[in-house]
Image: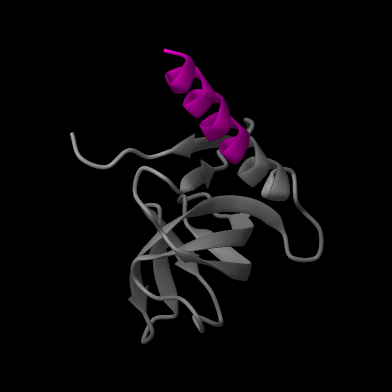
Amino acid sequence: MKRLICAAIAALGGIAATSTSFAGTAGSAGQLLVVGPVETVDLANSTATVLGQRVYTTSLSGLTVGSEAAVFGTAGGDGSIRASSIQSRGLYVPGASAIFFFRNGSEGRTFTRQSGG
């Protein structure tokens, strides 16, 4: 039981560290809107899908399917994202990598997506 509690505290600490390194980050690069796995990269249309969100950008360099990315920019009325900056964060690990999604009109939330069912 003690080990389980220690593991839970360590996991929450990791999530908090991840969220505080980005949460509320805004400025010339725009608002942090999503952190998560890169699911698709479409070079012909300059788009990517990150955590299920369509992202329009002028540069897809460094993005590969299966990696993790932090996307800064502005959200469109249709839910799409106009990225002003995308930071590659290395390999996405399901169940271990924290994810973040900002909804217009509410605070962003940081979660760890569990793999499997």
Secondary structure predominantly adopted by residues drawn in magenta: helix
Q: Residue at left 55%, top 38%? A: 103
Residue 103 lies within the magenta run: no
**The C terminus - image quarter:** top left
Indicate the colouring scheme. Answer: one colour
Q: Residue at left 45%, top 22%? A: 3
Residue 50: x percent and y percent? 42, 59
Q: Is residue 19 left or right of residue 37?
A: right
Residue 29: x percent and y percent? 74, 65
Q: Is residue 19 left or right of residue 56?
A: right
The single residue placed furthest to the left in the displayed view is: 117
Q: Is residue 56 visible?
A: yes
Q: Residue at left 54%, top 37%? A: 110
Residue 9 lies within the magenta run: yes
Total labels: the figure holds 0
The single residue placed furthest to the front in the displayed view is: 2
Q: Is residue 109 above or below residue 57?
A: above
**Residue situated in front as seen by the camera: 104 or 101:** 101
Q: Is residue 104 visible?
A: no
Residue 93: quarter of image: bottom left
Q: Residue at left 41%, top 69%? A: 48
The single residue placed furthest to the top in the displayed view is: 1
Q: Which residues are magenta?
A: 1-15
Q: Is residue 42 above or below residue 82?
A: below
**Residue situated in front as seen by the camera: 107 or 97:** 97
Q: Is residue 41 above or below residue 39?
A: below
Residue 102: x percent and y percent? 57, 42
**The N terminus - image quarter:** top left
